[in-house]
Image: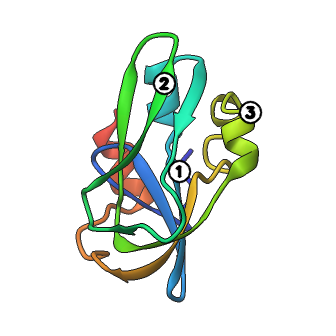
C-alpha cells in the first residue's frame, strides 16, 4: 500500500531520497484523515528546515494541519502545480510531492513502508 522507495514519519509525511536530493509529501493515510484538500501553504525556495520543523500547512474541508519536514535541508523547489490544484493530493498522495530539498541530515529514525503500515493499522 505504501511505496517502499520512501521513508515515512509518525506525523504522516513521506520522503523519497535520491542521493542528497529529496521530495516530500503526505501519505495516503494522512489525506484520508484530512478529507478533501482545498489549500496548501508551502515555503519559499531557499528556506532552511530542521527535521521536525513545520514547513507549511494543508487545509481540507475538515481541518488545517501543519506539515513537518522529515529531514533537515534547504528547500530547492516547491510544486507549483500542486499549489494550483491541491486536490491532487487526494487522488495521488504518493505521487504528489510538495517540496524538493537538498538533504543535510536527519534520516536516521524514519520508518520503512512496512513500519509505517503497521503504525497506521
x and y percent of residue 29 in the render? 46, 33
Q: Quadrant of the C terminus?
A: top left
Residue visible at 53% across and 50% down in the picture: 25
Rendered image: mark on residue 25: 1
Count of numbered circles on the image: 3
In this view, the residue in front, 72 or 111, is 72
Q: Residues within 10 Å of mark 1 (few under 14, many from 20)?
A: many
The answer to the question of whether label 3 and label 2 lie on touching residues, with beta carbons closer than 8 A, is no
Q: Residues within 10 Å of mark 2 (few under 14, many from 20)?
A: some
21 up-or-down from 42: above or below: below
Q: Secondary structure at mark 1?
A: strand
80 up-or-down from 57: above or below: below
Structural distance between the alpha carbons of marks 3 and 2: 13 Å
87 up-or-down from 10: above or below: above
| Residue position marked by numbered label 3 in the rendering | 85
Residue visible at 66% across and 48% down in the picture: 96
Residue visible at 49% across and 42% down in the picture: 27
Structural distance between the alpha carbons of marks 3 and 1: 14 Å
Mark 3 or mark 1, which has the lower sequence index? 1
From the viewer's perspective, tell me whether residue 33 is left or right of residue 54.
right
Q: Secondary structure at mark 2?
A: strand
Q: Residues within 10 Å of mark 3 (few under 14, many from 20)?
A: few
The answer to the question of whether label 1 and label 2 lie on touching residues, with beta carbons closer than 8 A, is no
x and y percent of residue 73 in the render? 38, 75
* Disc 1 versus disc 2: nearer the observer: 2
In this view, the residue in front, 115 or 35, is 35
Q: Secondary structure at mark 3?
A: loop
| Residue position marked by numbered label 2 in the rendering | 59
Amino acid at each position: 500500500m505504501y511505496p517502499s522507495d520512501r521513508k515515512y514519519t509518525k506525523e504522516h509525511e513521506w520522503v523519497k531520497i535520491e542521493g542528497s536530493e529529496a521530495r516530500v509529501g503526505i501519505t495516503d493515510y494522512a489525506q484520508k484523515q484530512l478529507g478533501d484538500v482545498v489549500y496548501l501553504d508551502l515555503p519559499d525556495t531557499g528556506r532552511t528546515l530542521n527535521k521536525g520543523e513545520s514547513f507549511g500547512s494543508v487545509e481540507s474541508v475538515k481541518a488545517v494541519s501543519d506539515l513537518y519536514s522529515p529531514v533537515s535541508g534547504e528547500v530547492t523547489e516547491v510544486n507549483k502545480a500542486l499549489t494550483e490544484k491541491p486536490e491532487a493530493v487526494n487522488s495521488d498522495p504518493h505521487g504528489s510531492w510538495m517540496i524538493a530539498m537538498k538533504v543535510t541530515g536527519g534520516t536516521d529514525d524514519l520508518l520503512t513502508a512496512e513500519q509505517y503500515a503497521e503504525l497506521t493499522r
